[in-house]
Amino acid sequence: MIESILSLTGLLSAFWWALSGSILKSSKTKSIILFPLTESTISLVFIIILIITTTKLEIILSYSAITYSYLFLGSIFSMTGFFFYILALRKISLGITFTINTSIVMVLTVLLDFFINKTPVNTNLITGGIIIICGIIIINSITWNFSSIKASNLNYLFGLVFSIIAGIFWASGIFVNDRGLIEADILSATTIRCIVPLVIYGAIVLIKNPFIYSTINNKDKFFIFSSSICITIAMLFWYLSLKANTASLTAILTSTSPVFAILFGILFHREKLKINEILGILFCLTGSMIIILENKLPS
């Protein structure tokens, strides 16, 4: 029973990721690094409390050098992907952003598992991946008009590119973190994941604008704080899924986030999708469902 619940933690991570994106999109602040800095701070405080109350601190220092290398590199990949994800949210709709980057994450993670971890990939997985790629092409090709390069089209294209880049870095992060979690426990992995962006973004803020929080209004502070809480929850479910499942299955389950993102975008942001975007999203979701049905969850 517990194993069955753990196998579905990827779905819960997808829900909280999408909710976080919906809240963050409501913020009008122009600072790109303010949100990941806030999120990593809140997450680290929460994780430290969990570590103190549930485990021994010395456990974090008991792993091999290669495990720390995996966790550190995975944190760098995740942080970079998160940066491009925020850039994408500023350019295109919530649903499109999640559809593209989660589809990229799923396909690349399955491929990495196949070529490096030697995880078997059958016809249904390949079919699902091809359908997902077709969906991304549909989203891109019909919207972009190469004969008339307008500012809005250029802005949209940048959003698509940022989403793809975010997906590539996130897929790399999932794969590397999965290697690190072979030895490390979840709380140790999340601690490193929080410290890396906190140190890097914190240093940037201290150098450029140490009083950056005083430049934003209370409404934006509320959005940033609330979204950070959602990311903290999503992150914990994500690591739980990586610990309980393979990297491929984690990527597959979290690929359902576009469904939640589209729903939140319509409900809270009154987003309207174009015909080709709807068709492309349906293709991506169909491909995701084929892969999900193929990968039977552990009983």
Image (tube, rainbow, N blue to C red):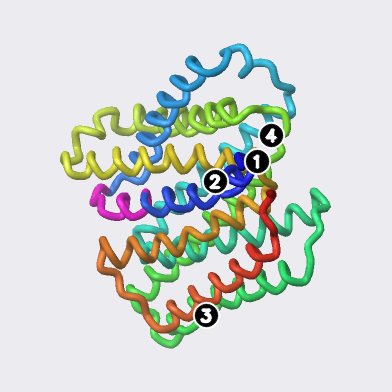
**What secondary structure is marked by label 4?**
helix
Tag on residue 138? 3
Where residue 75 sits in the image (x, y, percent)? 57, 37
> In the orientation shown, which residue stands out farthest toward the bottom?
147
In the displayed structure, does residue 124 sit left or right of residue 162? right
Q: Distance of mark 2 from mark 3, alpha carbons?
A: 30 Å
The amino acid marked with disc number 4 is: Gly
Vertical side of 157 occupied by 235: above or below: above
The disc, 1 or 3, on the residue closer to the chain's N-terminal end is 3
The disc, 4 or 3, on the residue closer to the chain's N-terminal end is 3
The amino acid marked with disc number 3 is: Ile
Give the residue number, with chain letter if any, for mark 4: 180
Tag on residue 244? 1
Residue at (33% x, 44% y) in the render: 227
Residue at (57% x, 45% y) in the render: 5
Between tags 1 and 3, which lies in front?
1
Tag on residue 9? 2
In the image, which residues are magenta? 20-29
Q: Work out whether residue 51 or residue 91 is closer to the camera in this orientation and state it.
A: 51
Q: For the residues labelled 1 and 3, say whether their Cβ atoms are less than 8 Å apart.
A: no
The amino acid marked with disc number 1 is: Ala
